[in-house]
Amino acid sequence: MLTATMDAATPIPRPPGDVDAPIDLPRVTGLQLRVFIACALVLFCDGYDMQSLALAVPSLITQFGVTANDFSLALSASLFGMAIGGAVFAPLGDRIGRKPMLVAAMICLGASTLGALLIPSTLWIALCRLFTGIGLGIAGVNAAALSGEYAPARWRFLIMTVLTCFVPLGAFLGAMTAPAIIDALTWRGIFYVGGFGPILIGCIALLLTAESLKWLLLRRPADPRIAVIARQLAPTLDPAELTVSTDQGATRQSVFGLLMPAHRIRTLVVWLSVGSGAFSLYLMMSWLPTMLKEAHWSSADALRGTAAVQLGGIFSSLLMAWAIDRRKLLPAVLCGYGCALLAFLAIGLLPGSVLGWQMLLVLAGAGTSGMQAVWMAIAVVLYPLELRATSAGWLSCVSRIGAVAAPFAGGAALAAGVEPRHMLLGLVVPVGISILAILLARRHFVPPPAVILTGEAP
């Protein structure tokens, strides 16, 4: 019987033939590394293309002769498309496989981004961004599923957290390189990179990744790829003996389970926090380049200022994951939102320089981008096994509602002549309400002991 170990003295027993046994072996194979690398590249593209239009909007306003508010629909369209892609199309990965959906998502993402260059119209760009969002939603869900199914239980939470960081990393590098790209190729260069890049990554995923072994065993047990993949994971393994254990307790439950008396307060507070956090983050991601230019920053500084938010998110998500893994959930959540609250207050009330604002935007990103990256892990920690899938699904839905509303709210504020610093100061309200709600419901944020060995909780 194959056995994975956390160390020499702590084995993780698996039933004979369990497909998780070769995946959980201490040595990570080349096949697993290729899957992780391909999924990381996919998520990197997600981050870049999610923010690409926001980086181009200041230049597009000048070229098209329109107002910032005219791009509200286009900025929201990609976020609405992400909701459609994640909820409607991404589950097709359970029917036709993770790998085909990843490749299709990258092609959809690249083609729609390049398509936005064809007609100089905000309505056309909005339509293209809708399909861009659909590709983003499909890619994110299936990349998470595929990497999770090849991640050893011992390192699953760490691997998933690191991979999640590639989304803000893509947005960060996109913002940092945008000034040079625009100088060389105008705003169209942002879309060239965001279009051809995903198509290239799709080709790499097609060549490098393997289909999920668990999916093949469940859906196509006679597929010859099972033997090829199994031998790459463990050369001595007999593919004919492989089985997939199913946990009936993990069956998805109704949303009413989340609203039962035992979970109601926790659920409502989590939804409030996720929705307000998504609103704050996507208002910045959508309008920060335009806001900073309105605040008389140079074009290059305005674009790089957006990168500061993502930089804060990268480091914050790793630190919060570390804290959650050590069952310090409540301090981690309060610290994250506290950083954002202080940053928005300082930006709105204190005189500041470009450097000072950039430092504060790093803090703001730590409390918004970083928190959004770990909320799914929090949903796993706070609920019993039978409610985790339902919790994650509804958490994503609530997050999308806040995200879609943000570009419209930001565009309306800019059209009304609200100063950029006051727009950011206004984000104190949703963040502050979240902090207050979490403090009042703090006893509901004490998770049960983590089950690291089985990978059921971080």
Image (tube, rainbow, N blue to C red):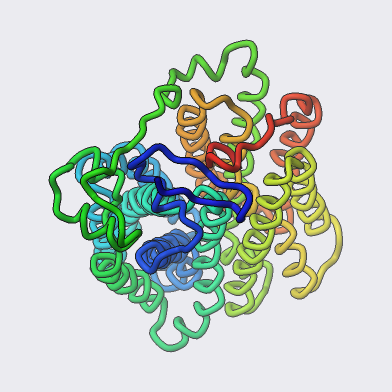
Which quadrant is home to the N terminus? Answer: top left
Residue projecting furthest to the right: 350
Q: Quadrant of residue 214?
A: top left
Q: Name the residue rendered at 61%, 47% in the picture.
A: 10
Which quadrant is home to the C terminus? Answer: top right
In this rendering, the count of numbered labels is 0
In the depicted structure, whether residue 179 falls above or below residue 319: below
Q: Position of residue 247 (x, y in %)?
A: 41, 28
Q: Quadrant of residue 92?
A: top left
Q: Nearer the viewer, residue 313 or 94?
A: 94
Q: Position of residue 79 (x, y in %)?
A: 43, 48
In the depicted structure, whether residue 253 falls above or below residue 200: above
Q: Name the residue rendered at 14%, 49% in the picture.
A: 223
444 with respect to 144 (left or right):
right
Residue projecting furthest to the top: 261
Q: Name the residue rendered at 50%, 72% in the picture.
A: 174
332 with respect to 292 (left or right):
right
Q: Nearer the viewer, residue 291 or 196?
A: 196
Q: Name the residue rendered at 21%, 45% in the picture.
A: 240
Q: Position of residue 116 (x, y in %)?
A: 29, 64
Evaluate whether residue 158 shows in this view: yes
Q: Position of residue 2 (x, y in %)?
A: 41, 49
Evaluate whether residue 49 shows in this view: no
161 with respect to 266 (left or right):
left
Residue projecting furthest to the bottom: 184
In the depicted structure, whether residue 16 falls above or below residue 266: below
351 with respect to 60 (left or right):
right
Q: Nearer the viewer, residue 110 or 10?
A: 10
